Image (cartoon, helix red, strand yellow):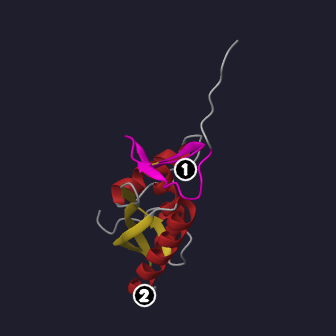
Amino acid sequence: MTSTTTKPAATADESTTAATKPGSAVSTQVGRGSTNIADVVVSKIAGIAAREVDGVHDLGGQAARVVGRIRETLPGAPDLTQGVTVEVGERQAAVDVTIVAEYGVAIHDLAAGIRSNVIDAVESMTGLEVTEVNVTVHDVHFADDDDVAGEAPAESRVQ
């Protein structure tokens, strides 16, 4: 005869324990199991939230955008973490976002919108408290830049 022992279910009085594992943002254990959220998940959430704000042309510095364009030509999903760096603890996260702003947008309002959207998305989806969102504006995009990129080079005035 085999005997089986069962672990009692967690009660409302039992506290939730949190521990961090390498490569994970947060690991919580409650009576019946654990939840692990990888750092890359927090980065993707923050990247998507930043891109949703009107006035953001792209994320990342120049080198990251060049690599991103090359990556776009390859099959597969786009890199949603481009231009986003996160530092995650047991219960808190800090996010750094590097953007290219559309010309004509009030940058201080844009940064505030990004900050608000990223905080709301990360906190509601992960349960982590976002302590700070640092926004770096790396460049400004002009609508004319798209037109110039598609044109043939102008004839040289020097012969």
Q: Position of residue 32 (x, y in %)?
A: 60, 43
Farthest top residue? 1
Query: Label 1: which residue?
Result: 78
* Residue 142 visible, this orientation: no
Q: Is residue 52 magenta?
A: no
User: Residue 106 falls in which quadrant of the image?
Assistant: bottom left
Report if residue 100 is visible in the image. yes
Query: Start and end of the magenta stretch?
Result: 9-37
Residue at label 2? 106
The spot of residue 146 in percent (x, y) is 51, 69
Mark 2–mark 1 Cα distance, whole angstroms, equals 28 Å
Whole-percent x and y of residue 113? 48, 80
Of the pair 3 and 101, the residue shown nearer to us: 3
Picture quarter with the N terminus = top right
Quarter of the rendering containing residue 4: top right
Percent of width and height locating residue 42: 47, 56
Considering every residue shown, the one lying at the far left of the view is: 158
